[in-house]
Amino acid sequence: MKALIALILLVQLPIHKAVPAAPPAPLGCDDPESEAAAEVAVNYINGHSHHGYKFALNRIEDVRVVPQGPNDEMIFLELDLLETKCPILSPTPLENCTVRSFTEHAVEGECDVKLQKLDGTISVLASKCHSEADSNQDIGKVCPDCPVLVRLNNTEVLEAVSAALNDFNSKTTGPYLRLLEIGRGKIQYVPSHVVAVEFAVGATNCSAEEAKVNVGACQLLPEDQSNFGFCTGSMTKHPIQSIHVNCQLYGHQPGVTYAHAGQDTSAGLPPSTVGSRNHDLRLSYHDPLASESSSSEMFRSMLSAKPVTKRAVAEAAQHDKVPRPVGFVPPPPPCPGKIRYFDI
Ligand SMILES: *[C@@H]1O[C@H](CO)[C@@H](O)[C@H](O)[C@H]1NC(C)=O
Ligand SMILES: *[C@@H]1O[C@H](CO)[C@@H](O)[C@H](O)[C@H]1NC(C)=O
Ligand SMILES: *[C@@H]1O[C@H](CO)[C@@H](O)[C@H](O)[C@H]1NC(C)=O
């Protein structure tokens, strides 16, 4: 298959070279076909991610289409994503998820996705992602006093999560909640010392009263009754000590599972997050199709094989020297596409 794709590409190159006057328009990053493929890709990525937050499309960086046959083509996408405020277990559809603003400390995801469009139906064949929090320096330039993300295993973050959850459990009339994972932690020092945390929780089979007697016996509800939720909390340490917490349970969502529900999650730190400030898509996201790492190398090479596009653009630019009818608007460069939220 790989050999076939390479062959097709090689066969195409000379065609572009030989017919400079009419290069076939390469698919642009903002073309509806690219956007349709990106939507499928982003839904797939969120659907296979098990930790952290849902991601939204910020920009299509690059797109390549390799025809395979009649009504059959391979689409290679390079995508820039941004973290939203919707936890991965949240039932809120992506369209309704707010992208975290730049000053809230954005997390950017990058994905390479290989798709197939067969008879008009787009499906993902393989994908590879990673994500990373923006640098503190970037935020400091815009907002010197904004609190920034700290490592998820930061002692003050662990302390705040534990205090916030205890506080909630001591007051709730609902089920006793257990920590699933810490999502974010931020520390502010001026004008007061505040630790702000976000964490995912799951309902147990105990009431708060029952938990007081023997918390060890309180288990997350079994899969067919699971009830996940999310808490935001803040612990003020100075000048006065106080704790604020707000938790929301989503209710049972058939088919939705937490990846580590079976293991002890008391620390709220899936192994992949220790020492990190965000849940890296590279680790939190499991693509069942991407076992062959060669495929990701393949789309790297596909995407870096840009000369065709570049050449086409250069030729288009030369053509622009020819007088155009009044009102002619040169086409926008095909890639990268527009930025939907902000540039990092
Ligand atoms: C999502 O947003 C749309 C439009 O604002 C609204 O009608 C819909 O109820 C929202 N859905 C959820 C689950 O919040
Ligand atoms: C919760 O489930 C565990 C394990 O099934 C069980 O041992 C425990 O008694 C249950 N607790 C309550 C309060 O039902
Ligand atoms: C967090 O994890 C990193 C990497 O494992 C480690 O170097 C650091 O000491 C840990 N911090 C705390 C507070 O445990």
Image (spheres, grey):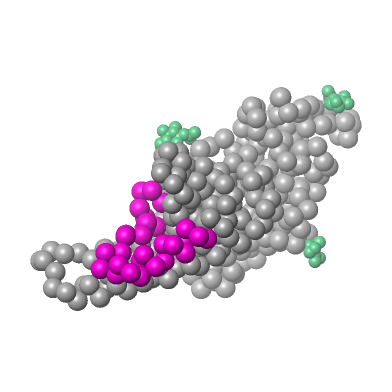
Query: The magenta stretch spans which residues?
Result: 6-34
Closer to the camera in the image, 276 or 165: 276
> Can residue 316 be seen in this snapshot?
yes
Q: In x, y percent, where is residue 280?
A: 66, 56
Q: Quadrant of residue 70?
A: top left
- Residue 158 as seen in the image, left or right of residue 66: right
Is residue 71 located in the magenta-colored stretch of the structure? no
Q: Which sits in the foreground, 148 or 38? A: 38
The residue located at (38%, 48%) in the rendering is 33
- Quadrant in the picture for residue 225: top right
Judge from the rendering whether residue 15 lies leftward or rightward of residue 132; answer left or right.
left
Would you say residue 7 sits in the magenta stretch?
A: yes
Image coordinates for residue 221, horizontal then vertical, percent = 76, 28
What residue sits 46% from the left and 49% below the top? 68
**Quarter assignment of residue 165:** top right
Residue occupying image coordinates x 76% and y 27%: 222
Ligand 3 quadrant? bottom right
Q: Nearer the viewer, residue 112 or 170?
A: 112
Residue 54 x/y as whole percent: 57, 47
Up-down: is 71 above or below 159? above
Left or right of 66 on screen, residue 315: left
Which residue is found at the position 59% from the left and 38% from the top? 90
- Please, is residue 298 above or below residue 225 in the view? below
Q: Residue 343: percent from the left, percent from the top? A: 46, 64
Q: Is residue 216 above or below residue 108?
A: above
Count of numbered circles in the view? 0
Is residue 101 among what the camera can see? Answer: no
